[in-house]
Amino acid sequence: MFYIIGLGLADEKDITVRGLEAVKGASRIYLEAYTSILMVQKERLEAFYEKPLILADRDMVETQSDEILHRADEVDVALLVVGDPFGATTHTDILLRARALRIPTRVIHNASIMNAVGAAGLQLYQFGQTVSLVFFTETWKPDSFYDRIKENSDLGLHTLVLLDIKVKEISDENLARGRKIYEPPRYMSIPLAVKQLLEIESIRKDDILEADTTLAVALSRVGGGEDQRIVAGTLADLAKQPEEAFGEPLHSLIIVGRRLHHLEVEYAEDFAVDRERWRTVARSVYGCALD
Amino acid sequence: MFYIIGLGLADEKDITVRGLEAVKGASRIYLEAYTSILMVQKERLEAFYEKPLILADRDMVETQSDEILHRADEVDVALLVVGDPFGATTHTDILLRARALRIPTRVIHNASIMNAVGAAGLQLYQFGQTVSLVFFTETWKPDSFYDRIKENSDLGLHTLVLLDIKVKEISDENLARGRKIYEPPRYMSIPLAVKQLLEIESIRKDDILEADTTLAVALSRVGGGEDQRIVAGTLADLAKQPEEAFGEPLHSLIIVGRRLHHLEVEYAEDFAVDRERWRTVARSVYGCALD
């Protein structure tokens, strides 16, 4: 049996009992590399499972899946992934490959940012499509996310924005010299994300991302653990906070839509940089019926 | 501390290790009533936890939250809910009440249908807003879901449709006689859901829900367990299946949007009632580039 097991969002204790049983019974256990970088150290997971883990980077999962699937029709093999196996990063390729090899598979679900985002108090059924925001460079500023946010915004829906991460990057200089030296991993911060959003707004000018009148909520480590952090405010509020205010990566950002309900405002207000401004914008710009 | 703990979607082993620890340490444990009806018996959960549970119906959670929260500032109290605490049914009311009473709270996330729906192989970021479909009566056929599906459909997005459940209903006759006798719980089946969708289409006529050319995927018990069931086909395909084909309740339905990618078609094809028709419609109606 080939298992793909979601680990949830915070630390080693977010695995389900079913998932832990599968780990305990597996002959080989792969850990998708993002996982160890983003949540807890590989060593900590190994101590918790009392079993060794094999690191598998994203590239290996995508292109060398036969190695991972080797003999999975005879012994149990597990691949551990952060969040849910069908969350922001899907694993349909390796499951399709297993199917072609006639290897039985089982997916063990867990929380992913796509549903844990509800922790901000905004209703999940009021979210439109999810978008990703990548690191801009001087010459490359892909802005298709803007069209998607506009589509949601036109319907009054919230948008979950997933922020870019860069792992295993090689600098131009090292690339030119043929040196396979990886740069340290980079995670997009909330202030940088807001800066990029406003930069595209200043070009496209559809008035959907305004510094002082668009509400947003930043989230990190939404797993119910100690290091969960939720910060709400106008885009300008968030841009002005120091990076530390948003906790550890990975970060996500919600752009609040106009169908905003007063109960959503009241719940998220607890996370606001400035409660008064949060309520004022919700009332006067979003038209929420607040006291 | 007041804990709200998501139980996931299938059975008692879908709770997280963190969640199980909180249950073990709690002085009182409430089980939201839907949970026991939909997943596993209360007794089975009690045996697994080795602790007694107090049943709390939805009404109690919403209107008598002070009873649940009693002394939660001194002892640990847990409320167990199916799926994720912020999934299809939110629990912001009781969390707001706890906040007002200055009781510390912690939410322990889990998979909900809002992300486990990815098990069908359709990409989560291609979903628009989620809608609910309620049981029609002779005189009451609320159709606002149709506008929402149309909004998603116009953007080419998939729609997750959550199907109604009726618990604690009292018949008109018993109501008239003042007898508090509850009818057995009812869960909307996939064939009935499709019938209702097509009924509203025949009135509204926006051509977004067509028996032979709209693709859909039905899901139940998406928890990685033995009783998970996923069935894909045209709306007509699904309407013709016997109810048993769709497994145990609770059921959900995905209406497939036009941005459908060929990899999504290939993954979900494994669940198709008729593979050839699934591919043909995907190719000729949805314009997917398939072999």
Image: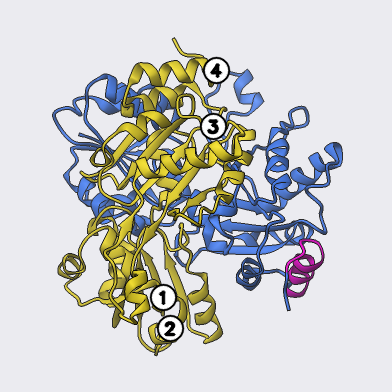
Chain colours: A yellow, B blue
Q: Position of residue A227 (x, y in %)?
A: 22, 44
Q: Nearer the viewer, residue B33 or A274?
A: A274
Q: Main secondary structure of the magenta part?
A: helix
Is residue B281 found inside the magenta-colored segment of the image?
Answer: yes
Task: Measure the C-alpha gap from mark 1 to mark 2.
Answer: 8 Å
Picture coordinates of residue B109, whole percent (x, y): 34, 47
Disc 4 to disc 2, C-alpha distance: 52 Å
Q: Is residue B85 left or right of residue A203?
A: left
Mark 3 — residue? Answer: A257
| Nearer-N-terminus badge (2/3) | 2
Q: Quadrant of residue B197?
A: top right
Mark 1 or 2, closer to the camera: 1
Same chain under badges 1 and 2? The reply is yes
Residue range highlighted in magenta: B275-288
Q: Which mark is residue A59?
A: 1
Q: Give the secondary structure at mark 4.
A: loop
Q: Measured from the top left, where is residue B249 in percent x and y?
A: 55, 52
Say the numbered circle drawn on residue A287: 4
Classify 10 Å Cα crowding around label 3: few (below 14), some (14-19), many (20 and above): many
Q: CA distance from mark 4 to mark 3?
A: 11 Å
Element at label 1: helix
Mark 2 or mark 1, which is nearer the start of the sequence?
A: 1
**Above or below B54: residue B128:** below
Amino acid carrying label 4: it is Gly
Q: Report the side of B1 relative to B145 (left or right).
A: left
Whether residue B166 is visible here, answered yes or no, is no
For the N terminus of chain B, the image quarter is: top left
Residue on which disc 2 sits: A64
